[in-house]
Image (spheres, grey):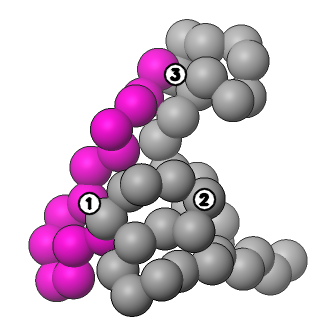
Amino acid sequence: MKYLKVMFGTKSGASDFEYKLNEVNVANIWNPNETEPNKKGGFCLTY
């Protein structure tokens, strides 16, 4: 499985989130109890 993230420098192309390099990045929105995918927020990781 492969994913593509569109970035403009350190900013996400999908939102205004600015990624910090060499630091822990914390999501602005995170609600694991939400059932609507667009409202859940957070980051997705796949190994």
Along the polypeptide, which appears first: circle 3 or circle 2?
2
Q: Distance between the residues labelled 3 and 2?
A: 20 Å
Q: Position of residue 32 (x, y in %)?
A: 52, 22
Question: Left of 13 or right of it: where is 26?
Answer: left
Left or right of 35? Residue 18 is left
Label 1 amino acid? Asn
- Gap in Å between the C-alphas at discs 2 and 1? 16 Å
Residue 20 falls inside the magenta stretch = yes
Mark 1 secondary-structure assignment: loop
Q: Is mark 2 on a helix, strand or loop?
A: loop
Pointer 1 with pointer 3, Cβ within 8 A: no
Look at the picture and state if 9 lies above or below 36.
Answer: below
Which residues fall within the magenta stretch? Answer: 19-31
Amino acid type at circle 3 is Pro
Q: Which of marks 1 and 3 is in front?
A: 1
Position in image of residue 24 (x %, y %): 19, 64
21 horizontally vs 4: left or right: left
